[in-house]
Image (spheres, coloured by chain):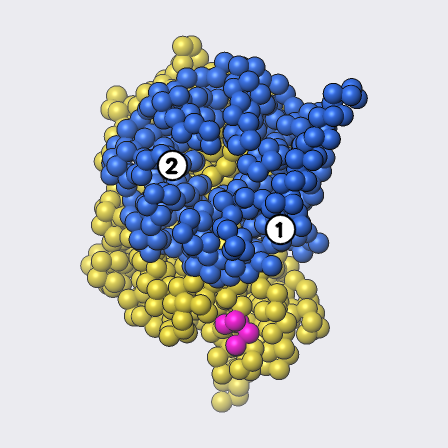
């Protein structure tokens, strides 16, 4: 008995210790998988409680002043059963000056639902009344997801209200029908043709939060289950595309900070909450805190957890996605995107085929290496063409040509019109990837605003060596990297913008290889340091690889990769591997050891070892099984 | 200033004063947003700026806001039979009001967004045309339903920025799209292209003096003129075409006066029916990035919305300018609507 008490005491102290030490400032968590289900669940609950503690204590404001409570603090206190009187008072104050748009709507939904039976009737009525004021729907897919999920839930909560009581001028039933139609449309499109905002470093919250709200609170079981399945779907994608919890490229949308400091993104806070395998970011992801309010309504399926944390072999995953809607200057409304991801223990390589994706915030390809503690590390290598154009703006936005470029730089995209930027996609970049080899070719027309390419060389690379052979060798973490510029270059300092709203760039180290040649290219070959007896041996191996290239009339590369593949890439033509042209038309929606789905199927099979979970958006079912070895 | 100019100015002032005494025949409504220069819209920041949306000129020449504080209205149309029935092209879709702007209903659903223009067929006022980023929707039931009517429009290239009904013939409509100007003569049952452009047609206007005369502005092809009701188009030689032109307007008080607005060129005017053109930017703040212009059909007063600066007005067709307020504004449209006799412009206004 004494030993049992001692064990309980030890466990309690351990739990208290873990709880007292914030994951924000503590050492990075273990990346080893927790195989015991109860322990895994307990860890998840502990992490969510840590976030709720933070939120209830005033979140970023760190205040108990009732006059300064925001809706996430109110939500956390309601979840914990605290301070109903102040929360009610503050809700009434906040609702007296309603905001507008999706980022105001979903927090008020959380207060409306969590406040049931907790907030005073007057406070609840103030929320409902605020929904009489105009709300903007926004113009991106994530805006609409938040907008319609919020409208759906409020309309369900107040099912019989007349049209004049809603900002839409439509009755509850009409709002519900419209919101439901959009939510079904979005899930059908995303599960048959691919995500429009795929692998977003920040916008994951804009999908996960409304989906979790729907999964938690929707009365219609079909919408509830649909939302639950979509949560599994996007978290399975997150798990598959992270390296020790860090989401790397390609990304439909990211920002200036995480494109270099890969960890420093909201996606990492989601990885931490769900998988526990990387530290959370400052403030637990900012408004991602809203996820924690009801996160205990969601359990990460083991198969997804294991994909994120239990990597026993290298894997190649090929997927499809969509670009952002293009209103103009495109043959297609949402051209298809083909993604390649190759993940190993020490590094990962990922890419799309290049071209325009999102006009401002796409990140097309990179090699990202694992870091024991990824915080403040710029653990990535890539090149890109800094494209800035009015055509790109007008393709995506309903705008006149001239004002938009400056406008976006003032609204969370500070480097869009900078020649030294490292964020964005270009119509003049074409990318090929085979395992851990990337070939990026550029054919930039004369007169282009920024007629050069930029290669990002991190401050955290070591042993950077410009070889007479033309290759540049370096080491990042336990990865050896070889970078072959196909044209002359110079070096400039890298100026780091810590995020989309950063006003100035910081000199944290690192360089940009800038190459002022319109016909251009980059070859990158990665390998694990453990594959070679020395760095010199790696260099010798790369120098021995057959390579021929020319830049006129268009860039062409013939290269035998470190893995023995004979690759031919010519700008504007289909690449060949060992003489066979790639046939992207045969690519599935997902294809790899972990995620598989046929185009148009609305059905995703998630696999890890013997574990399998099938998400079926047609039948609205999730089916688990343990496969026979 | 010469004696002639002084006399001209006095005469113009007298005409304006006389017009004011009689009362304008048109309401002027600005579709406007307020922004911190180079920054966010006023709706996103707690700044002491006026509300965005519709600002209507009253009898005292002062403007009053009505409708929602809304950052983006592109145009406003009013039922010619009933001043209370309004249709607004907005970010969320088309907003419909049946009470003069006191309350609004989002007429379209999730599958239509950010219409650029809206207009009513004066001969069939139940028919409303809505220019969309991906085509056109037409309501034949006063805004209750909005089916698409796109037969004849291309699969791509139908981004539509302007739509205007020919006042001379019911169901005859011109549409300014990415790939050119399109015409329907059967109420959008079918369309055909009447002019090809490299980039978007930004505006279409029908002359108040001659229903056969139309003008258009484009991003890529300069300014265009049609003398046959929009069937054929010619480039107007004196207007530069290297940069985008944003909109064009006729002067209802003078058949030979038109004006063009441009971010790059500022204000361009002609007073000889388009034969010669002059830049009229002296007195506008530099850089003279004119986002929108309008010409008051009652008195020929020229208005220029200078991007994030202010609204300017000219009593001499651009030769001199003075501020008309609206500092930090972006004007998306100067909307002139025929005033209803013995009826307040909008029900709620004094």
Give residue B28's quadrant in the image: top right
Between A216 and A44, the one lying in front of the other is A216
Dot 2 surroundings within 10 Å: few (below 14), some, or many (20 or more)?
some
Where residue B47 appears, x then y in whole percent?
69, 53
Residue drawn 33% across the image and 56% down it = B144
Residue drawn 47% across the image and 32% down it = B208
Q: In terms of sequence position, does the residue under pointer 1 or pointer 2 come before the other?
A: 1
Residue drawn 43% across the image and 54% down it = B82
State which quarter of the image contains the C terminus of chain A.
bottom left
Q: Which mark is residue A361?
A: none
Give the chain coloured yellow: A
Where residue A380 appears, x then y in whole percent?
53, 38
Q: Which mark is residue B167?
A: 2
Magenta highlight: main SS: helix
Where residue B169 appears, x then y in whole percent?
32, 35
Q: Is residue A3 visible?
A: no
Residue drawn 46% across the image and 57% down it = B84
Does residue A127 belong to the magenta stretch?
yes
Where residue A397 appears, x then y in whole percent?
47, 39
- Looking at the image, is B160 positioned above or below residue A86? above
Which portion, as a residue range, is magenta? A124-129
Give residue B214's quadrant in the image: top left
Q: Residue furthest bottom?
A: A1
Between A20 and B239, the one lying in front of the other is B239
Dot 1 surroundings within 10 Å: few (below 14), some, or many (20 or more)?
some
The subunit letter for the residue under badge 1 reads B
Do the residues indicated by labels 1 and 2 lie within the same chain of the protein?
Answer: yes
Between A207 and A390, the one lying in front of the other is A390
- Looking at the image, is A386 positioned above or below residue B126? above
Residue named by callout 1: B58
């Amino acid at each position: 008995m004494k030993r049992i008490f001692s064990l309980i005491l030890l466990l309690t102290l351990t739990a208290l210790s873990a709880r007292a030490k914030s994951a924000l400032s503590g050492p990075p968590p273990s990346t080893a998988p927790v195989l015991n289900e109860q322990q895994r669940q307990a860890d998840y609950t502990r992490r969510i409680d840590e976030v709720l503690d933070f939120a209830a204590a005033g979140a970023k404001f760190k205040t108990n002043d009732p006059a300064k409570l925001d809706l996430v603090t109110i939500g956390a206190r309601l979840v914990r059963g605290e301070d109903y009187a102040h929360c009610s008072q503050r809700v009434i104050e906040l609702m007296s000056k309603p905001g507008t748009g999706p980022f105001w709507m979903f927090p008020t939904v959380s207060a409306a639902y969590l406040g049931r039976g907790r907030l005073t009737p007057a406070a609840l009525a103030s929320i409902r009344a605020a929904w009489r004021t105009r709300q903007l729907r926004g113009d991106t897919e994530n805006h609409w997801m938040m907008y319609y999920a919020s409208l759906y839930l409020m309309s369900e909560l107040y099912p019989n209200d007349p049209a004049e009581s809603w900002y839409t001028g439509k009755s509850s039933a009409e709002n519900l029908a419209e919101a439901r139609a959009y939510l079904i449309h979005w899930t059908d499109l995303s599960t048959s043709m691919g995500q429009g905002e795929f692998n977003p470093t920040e916008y994951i919250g804009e999908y996960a939060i409304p989906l979790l709200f729907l999964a938690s609170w929707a009365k219609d079981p079909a919408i509830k289950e649909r939302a639950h399945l979509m949560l599994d779907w996007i978290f399975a994608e997150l798990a598959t595309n992270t390296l020790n919890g860090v989401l790397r490229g390609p990304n439909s949308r990211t920002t200036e900070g995480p494109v270099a400091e890969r960890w420093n993104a909201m996606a990492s806070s989601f990885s931490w909450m769900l998988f526990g395998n990387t530290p959370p970011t400052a403030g637990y992801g900012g408004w991602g805190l809203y996820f924690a309010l009801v996160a205990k309504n969601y359990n990460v399926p083991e198969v997804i957890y294991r994909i994120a944390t239990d990597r026993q072999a290298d894997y190649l995953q090929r997927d499809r996605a969509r670009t952002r809607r293009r209103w103009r200057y495109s043959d297609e409304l949402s051209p298809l995107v083909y993604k390649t991801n190759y993940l190993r223990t020490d590094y990962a390589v990922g890419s799309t085929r290049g071209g325009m994706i999102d006009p401002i915030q796409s990140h097309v390809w990179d090699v990202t290496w694992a870091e024991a503690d990824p915080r403040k590390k710029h653990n990535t290598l890539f090149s890109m063409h800094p494209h800035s154009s009015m055509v790109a703006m007008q393709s995506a936005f309903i705008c006149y040509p001239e004002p938009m470029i400056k406008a976006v730089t003032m609204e969370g995209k500070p480097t869009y019109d900078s020649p030294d930027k490292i964020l964005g996609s270009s119509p003049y970049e074409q990318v090929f990837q085979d395992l851990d080899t990337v070939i990026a070719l550029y054919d930039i027309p004369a007169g282009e605003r920024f007629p050069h390419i930029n290669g990002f060389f991190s401050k955290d690379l070591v042993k950077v060596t410009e070889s007479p052979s033309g290759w540049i060798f370096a080491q990042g973490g336990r990865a050896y990297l070889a970078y072959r510029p196909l044209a002359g270059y110079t070096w400039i300092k890298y100026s780091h913008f810590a995020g989309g709203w950063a006003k100035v760039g910081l000199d944290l180290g690192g360089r940009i290889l800038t190459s002022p040649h319109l016909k251009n290219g980059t070859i990158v070959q990665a390998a694990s340091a453990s594959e070679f007896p020395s760095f010199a041996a790696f260099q010798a191996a790369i120098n021995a690889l057959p390579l021929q290239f020319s830049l006129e009339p268009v860039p062409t590369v013939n290269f035998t990769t470190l893995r023995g593949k004979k690759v031919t890439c010519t700008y504007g033509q289909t690449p060949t591997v060992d003489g066979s042209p790639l046939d992207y038309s045969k690519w599935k929606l997902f294809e790899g050891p972990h995620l598989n789905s046929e185009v148009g199927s609305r059905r995703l099979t998630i696999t890890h070892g013997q574990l399998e979970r099938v998400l079926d958006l047609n039948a609205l079912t999730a089916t688990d099984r343990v496969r026979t070895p | 200033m010469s004696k002639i100019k002084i006399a001209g100015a006095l005469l113009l002032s007298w005409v304006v004063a006389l017009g004011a005494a009689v009362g304008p025949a048109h309401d002027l409504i600005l579709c406007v947003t307020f922004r911190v220069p180079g920054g966010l819209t006023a709706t996103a920041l707690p700044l002491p700026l006026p509300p965005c949306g519709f600002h209507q000129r009253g009898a005292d020449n002062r403007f009053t806001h009505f409708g929602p504080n809304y950052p983006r209205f592109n145009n406003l149309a009013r039922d010619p039979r009933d001043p209370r029935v309004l249709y607004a092209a907005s970010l969320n879709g088309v907003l419909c009001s049946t009470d003069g702007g006191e309350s609004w209903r989002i007429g379209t659903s999730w599958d239509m967004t950010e219409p650029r223009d809206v207009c009513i067929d004066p001969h069939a006022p139940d028919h409303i045309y809505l220019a969309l980023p991906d085509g056109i929707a037409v309501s034949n039931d006063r805004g209750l339903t909005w089916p698409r009517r796109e037969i004849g429009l291309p699969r791509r290239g139908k981004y539509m920025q302007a739509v205007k009904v020919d006042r001379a013939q019911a169901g005859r409509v011109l549409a300014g799209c990415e790939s050119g100007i399109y015409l329907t003569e059967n109420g959008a049952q079918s369309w055909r292209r009447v002019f090809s452009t490299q980039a978007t047609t930004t505006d279409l206007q029908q002359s108040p003096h001659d229903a056969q005369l139309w003008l258009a502005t484009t991003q890529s092809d300069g300014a265009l003129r049609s003398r046959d009701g929009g069937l054929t188009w010619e480039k107007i030689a004196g207007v530069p075409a290297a940069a985008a032109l944003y909109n064009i307007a006729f002067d209802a008080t003078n058949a030979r006066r038109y004006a063009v607005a441009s971010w790059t060129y500022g204000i361009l005017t002609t007073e000889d029916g388009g034969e010669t053109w002059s830049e009229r930017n002296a007195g506008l703040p530099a850089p003279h990035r004119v986002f929108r212009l309008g010409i008051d059909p009652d008195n020929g007063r020229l208005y220029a919305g200078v991007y994030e600066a202010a609204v300017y007005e000219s009593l001499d067709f651009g030769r001199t300018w003075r501020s008309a307020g609206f500092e930090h504004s972006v004007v998306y449209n100067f909307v002139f609507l025929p005033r209803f006799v013995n009826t307040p412009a909008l029900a709620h206004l004094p």
